Image (cartoon, rainbow, N blue to C red):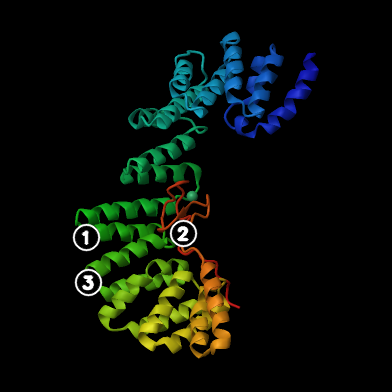
């Protein structure tokens, strides 16, 4: 194959290799390997077919034939890391760092690569050393991102805040949501050490940082309630109504408890009914129904169930109504009504929580998904609810 034809063939391959292109400088790699194109295309084909073992074999062979090729070394190192062969990835990247002919941009890239290898190996102290040393505008944002993850993994929230702020300044992208979470984490550890004033201060800091964040408000109410400040707790939680009404489901039990302490449970029920008019939420519906049974009796609660059934896709709400029909049904219909109840029960929706991003299911609500590690991806209630008709 002559030189020009090889170019024509290799170009579309690069477009298909999006993930690799992000990791290596493709143009540079082409320049460095134009003398051995067939082996190179063989390597690319293996990558295209996700045959990483064979791709590594070919690229290692290539890099031995072309020891001066920096891009090939980077490519081989990244492939080793992706395969989890951390010792070999580190050897390649550290070998690059020993070279005296690297440009300053390449040197920073190699420092970042070594930091990434140590991070993936779980050697956080060593990773931190390298990531802190990354300079230049090209690789600093990635180093700061990884450093933030590193401090989060180590529960070092102060440093996580510091680095997130630096990342915010460097890239201009807002990190206030993450920073508010980190501040809540500090508040929670203060509370564990029974330093309530410090804990409250950190929660107010978190609210200042990101006034739209539901979590600081949820935790603040919890703390005030624990101190017997029921009015204040209700006041804080009710602020969620205006900007994060979906999260009311997380605090409904606590709200009911506080209102009972103050003897204002009827006011609580009235308020819940108002909220579900504008923002029906499964957890809130369940609590409102139960509260209605307690305070107003079964007949009134069934009226509520009828209203819910019109708003929601959750067939569970048909059961109280079917129960009512069953009470008055004669023998001719009783069997049918029981069958309807049985079928409806079978369609009762799972009340677990699902991550919006990766779909991980959990019984409890998480602020950070245990699977994909993203923040605020759990909707506070799972059952699908139709909007206001
Ligand atoms: Zn997730």
For disc 1, the marked residue is 197
Left or right: where 165 falls relative to 328: left
Quarter placement of the C terminus: bottom right
For disc 3, the marked residue is 228
Q: Which residue is drawn at 52% across and 86% down?
A: 325
Mark 3 surroundings within 10 Å by alpha-carbon count, few (fewer than 14), some (14 through 19), many (20 or more) = few
Vertical arrangement, residue 155 with respect to residue 315, above or below: above
Residue 207 occupies which quadrant of the picture? bottom left
Q: Which residue lies furthest to the top in this view?
A: 65
User: Which numbered circle lies on residue 128?
Assistant: none
Secondary structure of residue under mark 1: helix
Residue 119 occupies which quadrant of the picture? top left
Label 2 beta carbon less than 8 Å to ligand 1 = no
Q: Position of residue 166 (x, y in %)?
A: 41, 42
Q: Which of marks 2 and 1 is in front?
A: 2
Q: Position of residue 288 (x, y in %)?
A: 42, 78
Quick one: label 1 or label 3, which is nearer the N terminus?
A: 1
Quick one: label 3 or label 2, which is nearer the N terminus?
A: 3
């Amino acid at each position: 194959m002559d030189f020009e034809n090889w170019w024509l063939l290799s170009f579309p391959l690069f477009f298909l290799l999006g993930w690799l292109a992000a990791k290596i400088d493709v143009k540079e790699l082409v320049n460095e390997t134009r003398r051995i194109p067939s082996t190179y295309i063989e390597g690319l084909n293996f990558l295209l077919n996700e045959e990483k073992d064979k791709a590594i074999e070919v690229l290692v062979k290539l890099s031995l034939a072309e020891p001066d090729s920096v891009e090939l070394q980077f490519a081989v190192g990244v492939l080793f890391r992706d395969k989890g062969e951390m010792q070999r990835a580190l050897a390649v990247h550290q070998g690059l760092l020993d070279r005296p002919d690297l440009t300053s941009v390449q040197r920073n890239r190699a420092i970042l690569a070594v930091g990434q290898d140590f991070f993936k190996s779980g050697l956080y102290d060593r990773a931190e050393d390298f990531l802190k040393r990354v300079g230049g505008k090209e690789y600093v944002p990635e180093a700061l991102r990884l450093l933030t993850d590193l401090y989060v993994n180590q529960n070092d929230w102060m440093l996580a805040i510091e680095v997130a702020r630096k990342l915010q300044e460097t890239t201009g992208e807002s990190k206030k949501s993450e920073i508010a979470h980190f501040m809540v984490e500090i508040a929670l550890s203060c509370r564990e050490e029974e330093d309530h004033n410090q804990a409250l201060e950190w929660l107010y800091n978190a609210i200042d940082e990101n006034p739209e964040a539901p979590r600081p408000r949820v935790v603040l109410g919890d703390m005030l309630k624990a101190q017997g400040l029921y009015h204040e707790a209700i006041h804080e939680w009710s602020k969620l109504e205006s900007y994060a009404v979906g999260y009311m489901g997380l605090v409904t039990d606590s709200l009911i408890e506080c209102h009972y302490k103050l003897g204002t449970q009827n006011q609580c029920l009235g308020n819940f009914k108002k909220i579900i008019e504008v923002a029906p939420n499964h957890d809130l519906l369940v609590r409102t129904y139960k509260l209605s049974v307690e305070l107003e009796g079964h007949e009134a609660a069934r009226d509520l169930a009828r209203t819910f059934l019109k708003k929601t896709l959750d067939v569970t709400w048909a059961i109280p109504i079917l129960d009512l029909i069953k009470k008055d049904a004669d023998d001719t219909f009783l069997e049918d009504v029981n069958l309807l109840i049985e079928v409806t029960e079978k369609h009762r929706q799972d009340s677990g929580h699902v991550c919006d991003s990766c779909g991980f299911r959990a019984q409890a609500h998480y602020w950070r998904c245990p699977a994909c590690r993203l923040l605020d991806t759990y909707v506070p209630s799972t059952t699908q609810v139709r909007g206001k008709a």
